[in-house]
Image (cartoon, grey):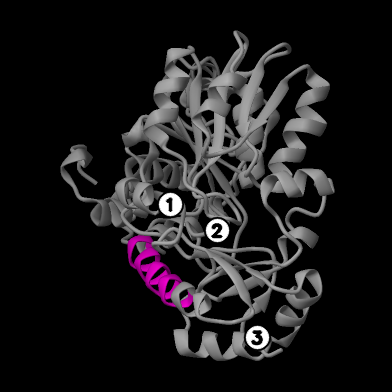
Amino acid sequence: MPNSEDDYKFDTLAVRAGQVRTAEGEHCEPVFTTSSYVFSSAAEAAARFSDEQPGNIYSRFTNPTVRTFEQRLAALEGADSCVATASGMSAILSTCLGLLGSGDHIVSSRSIFGSTTMLFTNFLEKLGIKTSFVKLTDMDDWAAAIRPETRFLFLETPSNPLTEIADIGQLAELAHQNDALLIVDNCFCTPALQQPIGLGADIVIHSATKFLDGQGRCVGGAVVGPGDIVGEKVFGFLRTAGPAMSPFNAWVFLKGLETLSLRMKAHSENAMAMARWLEQQSMVKRVYYPGLESHGQHELACRQQSGFGGLLSFELNGGKEAGWKLIDATRLISITANLGDAKSTITHPASTTHNRLTPQQREQAGIADGLIRIAVGLEDVEDLKKDLSRGLVR
């Protein structure tokens, strides 16, 4: 791959960026299944371990396959550096423990993944790191929560499962005015549909498990951002603590990136068709999808995203009983809490992804008992409509 990667368009980078061919001349990126590396001399080993000489040391933190994935994703996000991790949650943990210390403070959107909320409240709290939760779309709420010890603002946009949209540019300005970083979880759009760093964000988080893979095969995560922050501080935590991505998983994610743009366009088209159809169903109280004109931040989504993604949710009249009845009536759509797969998935957030939140926390996050989340896959939309129709009969 030539060094002038900035001259290439997104789809080219998704296929080519980061690859360095070995002496074997392979066309496909190889999987380096090795735990360690051989040095030519004691002096070379010492130089590697002291960081005086670049090169592979140990696959927990230096592996060529993982490095190729990191460089490719960084190129797609328009960033200097990327650190690949064992999961999306370990990406968030690595960022927090790499950048924060006792007495520091986070301002976080209330509309984040339930496990992220648990991480902030149950575990970072033990380390003396406090978190204030705010309404994602309320700028006054964000501003009021910032303290002198606030180190970063954290959010998902679109949010899961209500697909609320935050103004990344405004939040970046607010963060920087207060000497804080803006961290955006870009899991649901991916860089194919949204590039937060170009909008002012400092760090981007990914659960590579989702759309970056695209076929539900592997678990992984990534932190993307500046070299002096991600490449040094976050990498420093990973090197010591070891939440590393496996070489095989990195290779799978590389293959996923090659088709990322095509898949995200198809997910978006299918989700839009499903959302419009669901709006017409009498049992559906409300549909949450940024592509709909009825969505509260539709215009904002149009400005900062090139597509609306494959995630949608809708609230049924009838609460939990109606929701479970709908889910149990499906035959095609997979009942699973994961998303980002070529296969459509369905779940009841209140009793799965957000079940560890208190009823009050779920209410504040807008997670109603009748809420259903669908990650629309790549099947024929008419088949998906038929499948849902079985449970939409009174």
Asked if one can make out residue 372 in the rendered structure from this viewpoint, the answer is yes
- Disc nearer the start of the sequence (1/2): 1
Residue that mark 1 sits on: 190
Counting from the top left corner in percent of width and height, residue 75 is at 32, 41
Q: Are marks 1 and 2 in contact (CB under 8 Å)?
A: no
Camera-nearest residue between 335 and 374: 374
> What amino acid is found at the position of numbered circle 3 in the picture?
Leu
- In front: 335, or 52? 335
First to last magenta residue range = 260-274
Q: Earlier in the sequence, mark 2 or mark 3?
A: 2
Q: Is residue 155 above or below residue 318?
A: above
Could you say which disc has been placed on residue 392 in the image? Answer: 3
Tell me: residue 273, above or below residue 87: below
Mark 2 falls on what kind of element? loop
Which of pointers 1 and 3 lies earlier in the amino acid sequence?
A: 1
Q: Considering the numbered disc 3 on the image, is that residue within a helix, a strand or a loop?
A: loop
Amino acid type at circle 1 is Thr
Secondary structure, magenta segment, majority class: helix
